[in-house]
Amino acid sequence: MKRPTRSCVALVCAAMLMLQIMSTSVAAADSTTLAHVKARGVLRCGVSDGIAGFSLKDATGRWSGIDADFCRAVAAAALGNPEKVEFVPLKASARFPALRTGRIDLLARNTTWTLLREGTLRVQFAGVLFYDTQSFMVWTKSGVRALASLKGATVCVQRETSSELNLAGYSNANALDLKPLVVGTVAELEQAFLSGRCPALTADASLLAALRSRAADGAAAMTILPEHISKQPHAPAVRGDDDAWLVIVRWVLFTLIAAEELGVTGQNATERLRDPLVARALIPDASVTATLGIEPGWTARALASAGNYGEMFERNFGTKSPLQIERGLNNLYTHGGLMYAPPMQ
C-alpha cells in the first residue's frame, strides 16, 4: 500500500477541519432564538409603552397596533398560535438593551433602522414595516406654520431616539438655535407640550398624529408643520448573532406585503393559496422550511393571524382608525409607494 503523500494528508486535515467547523455551526444553529422561543412556548416581543397605531394596550389588557399585529404573525409562524406572545412594553432607552440581553426575542417598537444602530449595537433589522418621517407639531392658535418661525424656541423631544439627534443636526444646519427639552417617555413628551413647557414638539409624524387625535379640544387645536426633516423607516429588529431567526422574521414581513399585492387576505387565504401561482409566491419550498426549523404552513399561519399588509395598515392607521393617516410611502410600489417584497422562489 502506498503511503499517503503530504498533499493528501493536508487535504484530509482540511476536510476534517471543515467538518468540525460545520458541526460547530450546526450546534450553534440549534441554540437559536427560535429554540428558546419553542422551549418557552411564548414569543417575548418588545413594544412601545403606548403609541396608538403601533402598540397600545386597551382596558381589557389586549394589545393592538401594527407592531402588535406583527408580533402575533411571527408567533403564528414560529409557534403555530398568534396568541402565544408576551408583550414587553419598553421605553426608547431600554429597547436595545432588552434585545441584546435576551429579555425579548423580537423588537417591534416603531424603531428607526439606521447604520449607527445596526453597526454598533449588534442588532439586525428585518425590513421596513412602516415608512415615516420626522415632523414638528405646534398649537394651531400660535400662528406658527413653518419651522423658520420657531427660531430660538424650546422643542420637546424624546431621549435616546433618532429624533433627538436629528433635531440637533437640523437646528445647527439651519441656524435655528432650537433648544431641546429632552424627556424620557411618550407620556412625558405629551405632558410637557400640553403643560406649555415647550411651544413645539418633534417626533415621528405618525406619533404626532396619534397625540393630536386625542387632543381634548379636538385635532384641529394642533397643527403638524409641513416640513419633514428626516426619513424614519421603522423596522423590527433581532439580535445580530442569529441569522436564522432574522430570516424567519424578515420573511413573515415579506409574506404580508406580497399577499396584498396578490390580493390574498386573511379571509380568502385558504381559497387563494390553492392557485399554483399564488402558492408559489407565498408558500416556501419544504426544504427551506425544514432548514428554518418551523412547521410547514408558517406563511399561511402568519397571514391568517394578521391579514395582509394593507389590512394591517387600514385598521391601525387608515380610515378604520382614529389616526386617519394616508398610506403614502407605505403603499405598494404598484400604487406609488415603497412597499415591495422580494420573490420567495
Image (cartoon, grey):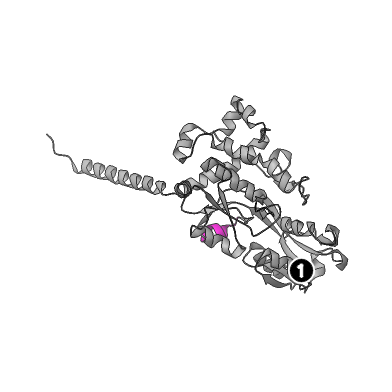
Q: Residue at x 68, y 56 (%)?
A: 231
Q: Is residue 29 above or below residue 121?
A: above
Q: What segment is highlighted magenta in the picture?
A: 113-120
Q: Which residue is mark 1?
A: 193
Residue sitting at the far front: 60
Find residue 187 and report its horizontal and vertical position in percent. 70, 65
* Drawn side of residue 329 relative to residue 296, left or right: right
Find residue 278 and report its horizontal and vertical position in percent. 61, 29
Q: Residue 126 lies in magenta, yes or no?
A: no
Find residue 319 and report its horizontal and vertical position in percent. 78, 45
Q: In which quadrant of the rendered image does the N terminus lie?
A: top left
Q: In which quadrant of the rendered image does the C terminus lie?
A: top right
User: Crowding near pointer 1: few (<14 within 10 Å), some, many (20+)?
Assistant: some
Q: Residue 119 lies in magenta, yes or no?
A: yes
Q: Residue at x 52, y 53 (%)?
A: 105
Amino acid type, mark 1: Phe
Q: Is residue 151 above or below residue 307?
A: below
* Drawn side of residue 223 relative to residue 247, left or right: right
Q: Residue at x 76, y 56 (%)?
A: 209
Occupied quadrant, residue 81? top right
Q: Is residue 12 visible?
A: yes
